[in-house]
Image (cartoon, rainbow, N blue to C red):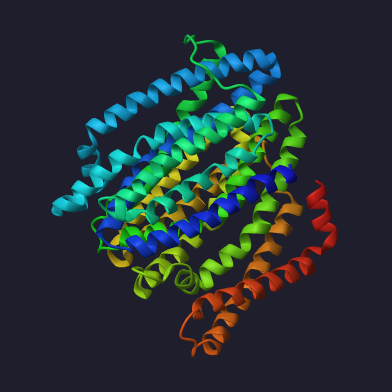
Amino acid sequence: MLGRIFTVGGYTLLSRLTGFARDIVLAAVLGAGPVADAFFVALRLPNHFRAIFAEGAFNAAFVPAYAHVHGEGGDASARLFADRIFTLLFLSQVVLLVVAWIFMPQAISILAPGFSDDVEQRRLAIELTRITFPYLLLITLVTLYGGMLNVMHRFASAAAAPIFLNLSMIMALALAAFFPSAGHAAAWGVLISGFLQGFLLAGDLGRHGGLPRFSPIELSDDIRSFFRALGPATVGSMGTQLAMFADTIIATFLPTGALSALYYADRLNQLPIGVIGIAIGTVLLPEMSRRITGGDHEGATASQRRAFEFTLLFSMPFVAAFLTVPDVIMRAMFARGAFSAADAAAAGATLSAYAVGLIPFVLIRSAVATFYARKNTATPVKASLTGIGVNLALKVALMGSLAQVGLALATAVGAWVNLLLVIGFAVRSGYFEIDRSLRISLGKFLVAGVVLAAALGLTAHVASAQFAQWSTMRDEAALGLLIVVGALVYAGVILLLFGPRWLRSLVRG
């Protein structure tokens, strides 16, 4: 499992790094003005649907179902199951695409009501979203192909596919002079990347398992079981995306740049979520599904416990850094071109608020895996909707005084509510146990995070004085120093608190 985690995490890290390069180009070309805000609305609409129907609900229902059919009936039954799901998925996405194209003005009125006073910005948002929305159909098929490959324990191509989104957008922005605006260039880059990702995964699946084909639809027991799991999973995924919709809607009423600050802060926050949380959760779900199908419930629980410890080990440095030095990070990453120091300060404060909830953000995929692997997608919905309720209430309460920082803080608090409820439900159902060993590990990780945060704060103070006279690369040099010092301090503290024996046992399982 560890090797697969590093495969997914490694490609995801490369994806995030190219994503940062993409965002640096976006910040330099688009800045944080009205064109940027219109593009980010155009990007969010297909992304919200993708997260609900594709990577969220679909994966949660499809991977355990496909693993079960493959384990019980072999390759032929699994292929027929995949063919039927592919047919249903393709037809539903085509219908959604046609409806979205027709009613796009109404959708933008709901998603970005604050644009109503600016006719040109509203027109641009509608135009750009019509360009980006077909990306949803393509990425949904990519998700189906990736789920099938994951059950075969082939994770590389699915993890590498998002790299094409970043490279495609960078190339399109480099050619922005040939488009009506830089926003149009970025939107076409998004759409082109959908085709590139589809070709990559279709090629891998065609070589190793065979592409799904159109098939007569028959509601077999396996298909019915899939849809019974898909319904609650969709509600759960929809809850999270509704909260993000709320961020977009509210931010359109805030001063110009609030949407952009949320975007850039979320991009950095997504680095540990993707490289650590989603990577580990992606590997854990088929692993637990396979063990539970084979009756190895104890092994499934042990795999989940190791996943928790891996997640905390790798994510704690990000929590410490985002809470203590977010301004340095934002200036070093994005403060150039059209992206000003004031824009970086606003995004840094937003990142710090997101960091309050980073632990539940990275742990939630591993936490819900114990339910999804048992084809129980209903229980996590209760936790998710409760967290969303808290999230939305806090957004309304905090948006006036804290602007987009309040929106991010509300998201963080809602994530904590969601995670704690999921763990509580798992313990009550006997799926998970918070034993003495895990409690001690949690305490040690907390101490390691506090020590690292103190070291980063002190290093940032020293770096500010040392590099004050530099005319260029001041923030980049400070960030480099923080990375080196932070890595050394954290490695030393982990070895001191846990010892090399714990690390060896964690790796060996």
The residue positioned farthest toward the right in the image shown:
501
Q: Is residue 344 above or below residue 82?
A: below
x and y, in percent, of residue 213 in the image: 52, 17
x and y, in percent, of residue 380 in the image: 52, 37
x and y, in percent, of residue 189 in the image: 39, 46
Q: Quadrant of residue 410?
A: bottom left
Q: Is residue 198 above or below residue 91?
A: below
Residue drawn 62% across the image and 62% down it: 316
Residue drawn 64% across the image and 45% down it: 8
Residue in the foreground of this view, choosing between 360 and 105: 105
Q: Quadrant of residue 97?
A: top left
* Camera sees residue 171: yes
Q: Is residue 470 left or right of residue 133?
A: right
Residue drawn 37% across the image and 70% down it: 337
Q: Is residue 142 above or below residue 312?
A: above
Q: Is residue 12 left or right of residue 292?
A: left
* Camera sees residue 376: no
Residue drawn 71% across the image and 46% down it: 305
Quarter of the rendering occupied by the N terminus: top right
How many marks overall?
Answer: 0
x and y, in percent, of residue 290 in the image: 71, 29
Residue in the foreground of this view, choosing between 461 and 484: 484
Residue in the foreground of this view, choosing between 442 and 89: 89
Q: Is residue 119 above or below residue 485?
A: above
Q: Is residue 29 left or right of residue 360?
A: left
